[in-house]
Image (cartoon, rainbow, N blue to C red):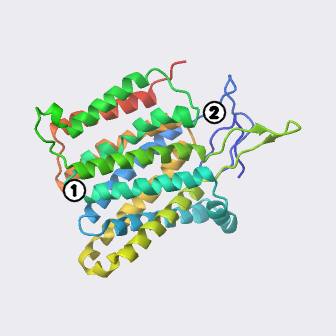
Amino acid sequence: MAAPPAPDAPLAPPGETPDRSTHAHADGGEKTDPVGAFVLMTIAGALFAAMNAFAHQAAAAAPVSVVAGARASVGAIISFLFAILVKRTPLRPFVAQAYLGANRPMWGRTLFGTAAMACTFLALGDQRLPLADAATLFNLSPLLVACIAPFLLHEPTDRRLAWTLPLAVAGVLAILRPSFLRGGAPSSLPATPVFTAILAAFFASFAMVLLRSTRGGRQEPEKGGVAAEAHQSSVEAVALHFSTFAAIVFLGFACFSGAFATFASWKSSVPSMLGAGISAGCAQLAMTAAYRRDRAARVAALGYLNVPMSAILGAVLHRQWPTLFTFVGMMLIVGSGLFGALMPRRK
């Protein structure tokens, strides 16, 4: 995350050129692969849940900028090695595509993704916010994607949104338990990490929409009737561009702030940082490939799968057992997301 696919071509596996011969819908629409997107997002959800758990543990001792920088650096290495060693992509064209050939959707995905990563690690670094609650708040992003994708990507939506959105909002209210639901009593969750997690979801929603855009647009006819194909960047190139930029930003801030001068106090967190980077780097490739295979709103809804996965890991690793309200909120959010993702779309 090669030439771009035609409007009726399927989204090929990562790094491969799609077969243009036999992939059109009866109505001439774009071919999608919802099953492939489901499998890839399930894998990405499990890996992102592992990243949340590792980062939550690492950020308890290490500076957030170092944890985020390590995650981004390892992610960049994984993207590079996957492209060169696994996909056998030629080195020079790949590097040129990732850096010199970055288009506006790639840069937008990178900038919004970096902002989302900063907020994500700040929220995970606050030990007052349980991992299950943080993961649930992060997954407000699919809700936002479902709202903005029809406007930014001109992808179809339907009346199910009128049901899924209220259910998801009810789930969020169950997690947050605001004062008006508690008879005026203050919420049990601290405001700062909660707001930071919601802000992470806001930035991530735009990054997700722009991931869909990086697969290339539809063909536009030029003079003489010749169609001009939009540029498409590979899955690995998109991931490498984002991870490299984020690594430079976070590690640069860590150096400027003197975070490495206190290495002796957080060196025990290095294995957790590596675990966060490896799981997130692999998840990034899977997620980027998933967004190439289906509509952004439906793929984003599958991201809800990492909510129960994060809750399980938080309970096992940190003994942060979900409360009844958290459990109800997770069920509402996950149920609404899966309903919107898996049920057939009404015409």
Quadrant of residue 119 within the rendered picture? bottom left
Callout 1, which amino acid? Leu
* Most foreground residue, 181 or 75: 181
Residue at 26%, 52% in the rendered image: 193
Give the spatial CA distance, label 2 vs label 1: 42 Å
**Residue at numbered disc 1:** 317
The image position of residue 271, as x and y in percent, is 32, 69
Q: Is residue 341 above or below residue 293?
A: above
Look at label 2 and name its amino acid.
Lys
Q: Which residue is most to the top?
A: 347
Residue 172: x, y in percent?
28, 36
> Which sits in the foreground, 57 or 201?
201
Viewport quadrant of the C terminus:
top right
Q: In x, y percent, where is residue 113?
A: 47, 53
Secondary element under disc 1, as helix, strand or loop, is: helix
Give the class, few, some or many, for how many residues have Cα within 10 Å of label 2's Cα (few <14, many ≥20).
Answer: some
| Residue that mark 2 sits on | 31
Q: Residue at x 55, y 66 (%)?
A: 81
The answer to whether residue 1 shows anywhere in this view is: no
Give the SS element for disc 2: loop
Mark 2 or mark 1, earlier in chain: 2
**Horizontal side, residue 130 vs residue 163: left or right:** left
